[in-house]
Amino acid sequence: MELSADEWIRLGRECLDAGTLFLLVTGGEPFLREDFRKIYEALSEMGFIITLYTNGTLITDETINWLSKRPPAKLTITLYGASCETYKQLCGDGKAFDRVYGNFKKLIDAGINLNIRSTITKRNLHDLDAMRQIAFLHDIPFDYSCMIYKPVRGAVSDAESERLSPEEIIKLRSKDILPDFIKPGDYTYLKKEIKSKLPPLSCTAASCSWWITWDGRLTPCSLMDTPYVKIKDKTFDQLWREIQEMVKDIPGATKCKSCPDKEYCSVCPGILQAETGTFDQTSDYICDFAHRLKSGFQMCKEI
């Protein structure tokens, strides 16, 4: 069952008391909740620095007026393409593009700090340059991701048929890297030395960040189904202590320890769990990406 507005607000107060400053509010789609404004207003009044993620389709002129009175630190709209045709193919609603695009100038004029992000798939790759142009014309920061992992938390999608291949990702990302930044030398030993001193979760998950699902489970991050702690009848302090103990038992993939490409690999337990369903099995998709990335860096060093 989905958490009620009062439960979200209670958690907000407890997180604030525990020292939380930054909040990412996302979904799903936050604006689908009829009581979202009640939740957002309460969190905003607590003083959090809020980033709000939305697909932008449910934002109306009245919504913009409401947001302008309590603007988030950053409003990030996910753009799925640069045309009605792409939206129709990828999202099933071609008219959604016009609604989203029409809000950009209105949001900026209302003084809302707007960012655009996109997830690149096989079906919208052809629109990437056009999406960049949209952001440029409106002077809006733009970022994209092309790493798509298998669905978690019960979601259903065919990620493997939608996502780009490792070869396509490296080719795409190489256009965004300035060769002048690449200096002669091998610096991977630094990464190796640092990695050897890190815990199983070497990111911020369960050390200074956490994720709360719609149905009331606290997990280390958005990629991980487990471990988790149920929120009902527990304070945030209790949840935080429990999840920190749980992550200590997360195993690593034995094969990764002796892999010749590991210094070029960004794999983590969360990614492995999403890709394989377990923490200690490797993913062919991620391994292929690391191998190709290593080959690319070696070519750069030889130039």
Image (cartoon, helix red, strand yellow):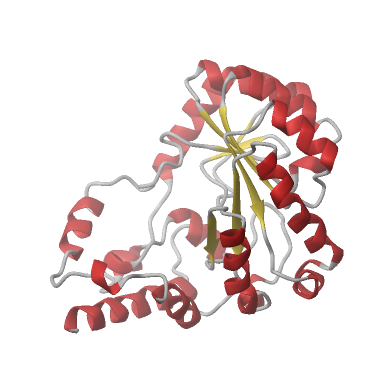
Residue 77: percent from left, percent from top: 66, 51
**Relative to 133, residue 117 above or below:** above
Instruction: Name the residue nearer the viewer: 276 or 2.
Output: 2
Frontmost residue, 191 versus 127? 127
Locate residue 27: give its quadrant.
top right
Left or right? Give the position of 283 relative to 24: left
Relative depth, front residue between 57 and 249: 57
Q: Would residue 190 be found to the left or right of residue 46 on screen?
A: left
- Residue 241 in the image: state x and y as whole percent: 47, 26
Res. 2 in view: no
Tell me if residue 30 comes above or below residue 245 in the rendering.
below
Residue shown at 74% from the left, 27% from the top: 39
Identified at 59% across, 40% down, the residue is 113
Q: Which quadrant: the N terminus?
A: top right
**Residue at image coords 54%, 65%:** 275
Where's residue 34, x and y in %? Answer: 86, 34
Which residue reaches farthest left?
185
Residue at 24%, 70% in the rendered image: 180
* Count of marks overlaid on the render: 0
Residue 287: which quarter of the image?
A: bottom left
Residue 58, how many percent across, how many down? 82, 47
Is residue 125 rendered to the left or right of residue 103? Answer: left
Is residue 258 among the parts visible in the rendering?
yes
Q: Quadrant of the C terminus?
A: bottom left
